[in-house]
Amino acid sequence: MTDPSPHPDLPAARLRATLWALLALASFHLAHSLPSCRTLILLYPFALVQVIPLVSRRVAFYGGLALGLLLYAPQLQFFWTLFGAAAAVLWLILATWLAVFLLLSRSAIDRWGPAYGALALPFLWTGLEYARSELYPLRFSWANASYPIGSSELRPLLSSLGMYGVGFVTVALGGVFWASREPRRRIALGVILTLAGLTPLLRNHASPAERSVQAAGMQLEETPEAAIIPALDRLAARHPDAELLVLHEYLLSGEVPENMRRWCLEHQRWLLVGGKRQLAGDRWQNTAFVVGTNGSVVFEQGKKTPIQFFNDGISAPTQKLWQSPWGKIGIAICYDLSYTRVTDELVRQGAQALIIPTMDAIEWGPRQHELHALVAPTRACEYGIPILRVASSGISQFVRADGSVESSAPCPGPEATLSGTLRLGPAGRLPMDRYLAPFASGAATILAVAMFLPRRRRGDLHPSSPPVPSGPSAS
């Protein structure tokens, strides 16, 4: 591949590409860092798409790598705390996904022209985002472009579109903006796509709750097991109306001990606590246990997706719902909530609420806790069900079915508590992107193969597409 020959508008194109890239960079960081700027995240993919017709394929790829590092390294700086120098490799892997998107998008324009190339962009974006977050071995949805929306005024968008669907619509809007040469046509198409994206805002999500339970949680990082019973006493005293008490992931080094089960019987409280289920040999499973008011373990759920590079046990073979006295409750452990393929299964089974025991170590830093706290409101919006997330050292959250946070506990927050009413209404629902995103991944693969097949020779029935007038094309 060679760089394109000089173009008379090359300096102007490079300047415009740089400005659009800076806008994408600024909107990404502001949305992820400042609660008042969450809605700016919509500018990130939109501005990113404006760069594509202004650069060559080579610049798209290597510029995408540089931009990706500037996006991900500052936000995910806690990777250095977790992995040391290997964090640079992980940042580079994340940046590579962005570089591949820009390269494939530029190649699509070169192959099929601006109009048809623009049609490919939302499928490439959504397919790659879904693959990097859910499908490949290092899958991790950190810094997904839609997470800030769940904590903004635009969170109703997620109820129908879903996190991947919002990205699809935003990138489609970006493609329409530069692909249509006729200004009036551009405006008309933009209005249509905008109205389609804003349709969920008009929906009425209010529905009467069928059952409810008062619940409370406490953050107990680095608490020895001998001190857990006194901590439960304090939690019960602070929240005397709470029927269900929730403690975080990995609080126990094994299964629920006898004294804790006896405490539940004596105090007539339900308890959900994280521990370990010992399996055959030296294998074990990261597990959440539910203890009933009869003093017995009535339900348990293992972690479905153990975290890479950590000693996090083995994957749970099945997922089931806890048939609680108040309704069907799904339990997902820590980063299980970040994978839609895990939580979607609980919703398919009819979950009316989710409880998420979480281990977020205080040594990982506030940035990790803040980014992780963006996930629960997003999932609540997507499914339309409440979520109680209790973390070891913050940020714990009681999230309503519309994504608003009813109460929270801060980071750092030793023995900080939170409480609220877990309202179990209708079962959750899946947004449309749960069907769109897997299709987009397949479509992106087909497009990537098709755009690099040999071109038709001159004299074929279909002439080559005209070059994009707003910038240089790549050979």
Image: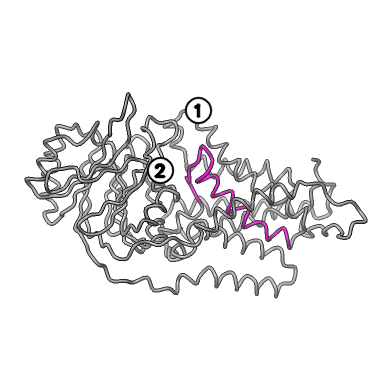
Give the main secondary structure of the magenta stretch.
Answer: helix
Give the magenta part as a residue range.
116-144
Q: In the rendered structure, which amino acid carries the disc numbered 2? A: Arg
Q: What label sits on residue 85 in the rendered view?
A: 1
Q: Earlier in the sequence, mark 1 or mark 2?
A: 1
Gap in Å between the C-alphas at discs 1 and 2?
A: 18 Å
Query: Few, some or many C-alpha atoms within 10 Å of disc 1 (few <14, some 14-19, many ≥20)?
Result: few
Q: What label sits on residue 367 in the rendered view?
A: 2
Label 1 secondary element: helix
Label 2 secondary element: helix
Nearest the viewer among 82 and 207 is 207
Question: Could you say where residue 81 lies in the image, as x and y percent from the top left?
Answer: 42, 32
**Residue projecting furthest to the left:** 266
Q: Is residue 98 visible?
A: yes
Query: Few, some or many C-alpha atoms within 10 Å of disc 2 (few <14, some 14-19, many ≥20)?
Result: some
Q: Is residue 23 visible?
A: no
Q: What label sits on residue 397 in the rendered view?
A: none
Question: Could you say where residue 355 lies in the image, as x and y percent from the top left?
Answer: 29, 51
Residue located 34% across and 59% down the image: 350
Residue located 72% across and 51% down the image: 106
Residue 260, magenta (yes or no): no
- Answer with the quarter of the image where residue 429 lies: bottom left
Residue 119, magenta (yes or no): yes
Nearest the viewer among 302 and 138 is 302
Nearest the viewer among 101 and 433 is 433
Question: Could you say where residue 198 lies in the image, as x and y percent from the top left?
Answer: 50, 70
